[in-house]
Image (cartoon, rainbow, N blue to C red):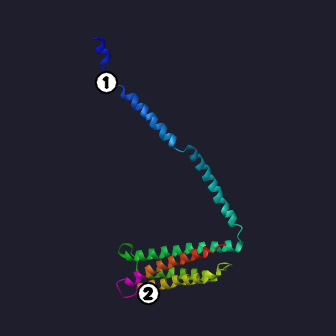
Amino acid sequence: MLTLVSTTDSKPGRWILPVVILALIGFTYLFVDALPPAEVAASTSTTTATTTTTTVPPTTSTTLPNDILAFLQEIDRFETESRALQTDLDQVNDDWEDSDRTGATLDQTRLGFEDVRDAAQELANQVAAANVPEPFPPAWTETVVASQLLVTTADDVIAGLLAPDDGSDRRAAVIAYGEATTAFIQQLDVVRALTP
């Protein structure tokens, strides 16, 4: 009778819990041990070092002559203005396309496109008149041509607006203006790439 009581377990699954706990501890140890705690600290230090390194190149670029630094700032401004003109032209075009909702009139739309064209002409004039230091002059002629294309395509948009068609000419000219803007910005990148 004593033998029966000692060999028969009234709670047969009670050995599973300690095994599960040991398995969890083992997996936790393996998982935590596999994590690179030292690398996280090193990564944080590296990020700080990278930030410091990132701070250093502007200091290095300050060693460029002032005329080159001023010219690079002008290139950035030209890009910003060309992007803004693209946004303005798209907005005027969108308002005209949805004139039932926006109330845009033909005269308002024409004036909006003319404002973009006039601003593009001013931008092209500034590009042509820019003081271009060495080593940038070889690429600057194409940049001037690319800026003039903004004016030409803006004129095409105005002509398309006034064309007696279903708007296809205007839509095609708006697409061409966007392509001209992209080409102008790409040309500015070509010029930037010549920075010594």
Q: How many marks?
A: 2
| Residue 21 x/y as whole percent | 42, 31
For the residues labelled 1 and 2, the Cα–Cα distance comes to 91 Å
Viewed as shown, does residue 183 lie left or right of 56?
left
Q: Residue at x 64, y 54 (%)?
A: 49
The residue at which mark 2 appears reads as: 159
**Front residue of this view, candidates 180 and 94:** 180
Amino acid on which the number 1 mark rests in the picture: Pro
**Front residue of this view, candidates 145 and 128:** 145
Q: Quick one: SS at disc 1?
A: loop
Label 1, residues with CA under 10 Å away: few <14, some 14-19, many ≥20: few
The residue at which mark 1 appears reads as: 12
Instruction: Work out whether residue 106 can be spotted.
Output: no
Q: Quick one: SS at disc 2?
A: helix
In this rendering, the label closer to the viewer, 1 or 2: 1
Q: Which residues are magenta?
A: 161-172
- Residue 162 is a magenta residue: yes
Say whether disc 1 or disc 2 marks the residue closer to the N-terminus: 1
Amino acid on which the number 2 mark rests in the picture: Ala
Viewed as shown, does residue 124 lie left or right of 7?
right
Q: Residue at x 62, y 56 (%)?
A: 50
